[in-house]
Image (cartoon, grey):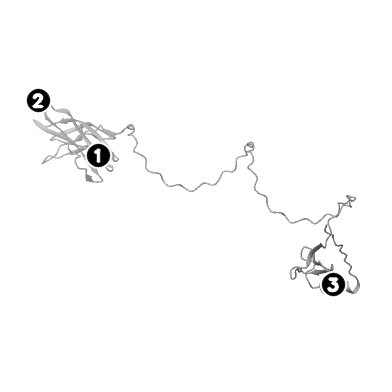
Amino acid sequence: MIRRKKLTMVVTGAAAALVFGAVAFASIPDGNGVIHTCYGKSGGSLRVIDATNTSCGSNELSLNFNQQGPAGAQGPVGPQGPKGDTGATGATGPSGPTGPKGETGATGATGAAGPVGPVGPKGDSGAQGPKGDTGPAGPSDAYFYRELSGTDISYSGAFDYTIVNYITVPAGKYVINAKANIGTNHAGPVLIDCGLIAYSYGNYVPYSASDSGTLILNKNVGMNAAPDYSMETLDLSATTQIQFRCGGADSFTEDSYMTAIKVANLTSA
């Protein structure tokens, strides 16, 4: 049976001062609050060491003491103290994460109409559209004049014409008709010729004298009067005077009549 040795540690007076003074500069206790000692197996001596620099000898036992005792039992709850003063307002904490999207609310009532905005700039011109269908022909314009008084169409020397009627028309396409009643005092056969001709500001209009009406009268056989007709189609680019002229030896006209009907198109069919 192994007999345990009783350890008695008494440190008093100058010895205590010597022991603790000798270790005043050592790391005792260590950083965890533990006091390291070495106990002599023979004689029971006890010495305090700095475990970071010194270790126990082969004839010593290492004994460690905790500088802080074990925690005691929790005591009873003390009475509630008085309410402390309100502390200062703390700094604003960081913003929290965005929450999930809420449900769509009900549609609100329609607001009042706002004022009319300013007129915007003029837009670019659009592309030209396709050509439309030809519309219906518009109403025609008609120009006419009736000359009731008689006109002498005789000539001396070579055959010549006398103006018996005329009308003035603006630019356009026209169908012209003219008629005059012819009489003669000539003894024997006589040739009577009537026709149309046009002038624009004093200049002859080409192809305006393409038609004429010719009569042969003979007073001796009772043929001393007859109507004479003439017709033209003209495409005029400016205001024009259209004349009806006749010529015949010892002859005259009575009741001449002219019409010029403006049309949309002149088509030779």
Is label 1 in a helix, a strand or a loop?
A: strand
- Asked whether 111 or 191 is in front, the reply is 111
- The amino acid on which the numbered mark 2 sits, given as a three-letter code, is Val
Which tag, 3 or 2, sits closer to the chain's start?
Answer: 3
Q: In whole angstroms, how far apart are the C-alphas of marks 3 and 1?
A: 148 Å
Q: Nearer the viewer, mark 1 or mark 2?
A: 1
Q: Are marks 3 and 2 in contact (CB under 8 Å)?
A: no
To which quarter of the image does residue 184 belong?
A: top left
Is label 2 in a helix, a strand or a loop?
A: helix
The residue pinned by badge 1 equals 235
- The amino acid on which the numbered mark 3 sits, given as a three-letter code, is Val
To which quarter of the image does residue 43 belong?
A: bottom right
Please provide percent x and percent y for residue 254: 21, 31
How packed is label 1: few (under 14 Cα within 10 Å), some, or many (20 or more)?
Answer: some
Instruction: Residue 178: tell me if it is visible.
Output: yes
- Asked whether 32 or 104 is in front, the reply is 32
- Asked whether 178 or 226 is in front, the reply is 178
Please provide percent x and percent y for residue 54: 75, 70
Q: Nearer the viewer, mark 3 or mark 2?
A: 3
Query: Residue, x 80% and y 63% (percent of image)?
Result: 63
The residue pinned by badge 3 equals 19
Residue 221 is labelled as 2
Q: In whole angstroms, how far apart are the C-alphas of marks 3 and 2?
A: 190 Å
Q: Nearer the viewer, mark 3 or mark 1?
A: 3
How packed is label 2: few (under 14 Cα within 10 Å), some, or many (20 or more)?
Answer: few
- The amino acid on which the numbered mark 1 sits, given as a three-letter code, is Asp
